[in-house]
Image (cartoon, rainbow, N blue to C red):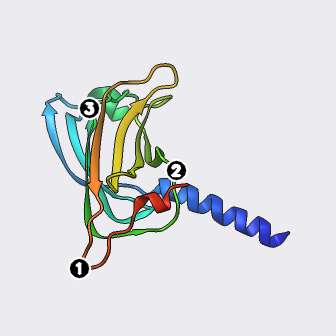
Amino acid sequence: MKRIVAAAAALVLTATGALAQDPDLIFKRSTVWKFLTPDHKLAVYAIDDPLVEGVSCHFTVPEKGGVEGMLGLAEEVSDISLACRQIGPIVFKQKFDQGEDMYRQSRSLFFKKMQIVRGCDVRRNVLVYLVYSDKLIEGSPKNSTSSVPIMPWNGGEAPKCAEWLD
């Protein structure tokens, strides 16, 4: 029984750990100047796919300034861009579902979140990443997609993403 509980706990920690990674801030650029409060900005972040070694994504999100932004009460807009690339040999760490969350971040005090999800284009052996934001009551059609063709690295054979789908 102890082994079953330990295995279940490890599985939960692995699944939640995949979403717990914080992205690295690359830089911010002011877009609107605000007097005596933080400016509106665009922030560029990088994150490595926690289940697919060799893939990194960069995304840009707007960050509201002003009094609401300073106090953490601003609801961020849904304009998010995404670019993902193969940066080394592809190594799948575990199986995954089509459209599974790779990263999730809150975009407002309540109800709104940004999600990066991963899928596999089986026919072309391409990883596909989609970023979008949603709200509890209404979602946003604004999204961005990036594709990562799985290529051989240093003369090795490219793995097939189809073999890692659940």
Residue 26 in the image, given as x and y percentages of width and height: 22, 55
- Helix, strand or loop at mark 2: loop
Residue 65: numbered disc: 3
Give the residue type that dot 1 points to.
Asn
Viewer-side residue, 108 vs 161? 161
When the figure is inspected, residue 153 is found, relative to residue 124, above or below; the finding is below
Residue 110 in the image, given as x and y percentages of width and height: 50, 29
**Residue, disc 2:** 97
Give the residue type that dot 2 points to.
Asp
| Sequence-earlier tag: 1 or 2 | 2
Label 1 vs label 2: CA separation?
28 Å
- Contact flag, marks 3 and 2 (Cβ < 8 Å): no
- Helix, strand or loop at mark 1: loop
Which quadrant does the C terminus fall into? bottom right
Mark 3 vs mark 1, foreground winner is: 1
| Crowd rating for badge 3 (residues with CA inside 10 Å; few <14, some 14–19, many 20+) | many
> Which of the 4 quarters of the picture holds residue 89?
bottom left
| Crowd rating for badge 2 (residues with CA inside 10 Å; few <14, some 14–19, many 20+) | few
Viewer-side residue, 148 vs 113? 148
Residue 26: numbered disc: none
Residue 112 in the image, given as x and y percentages of width and height: 45, 30
Label 3 vs label 1: CA separation?
46 Å
Residue 17 in the image, given as x and y percentages of width and height: 53, 59
**Residue, disc 1:** 154
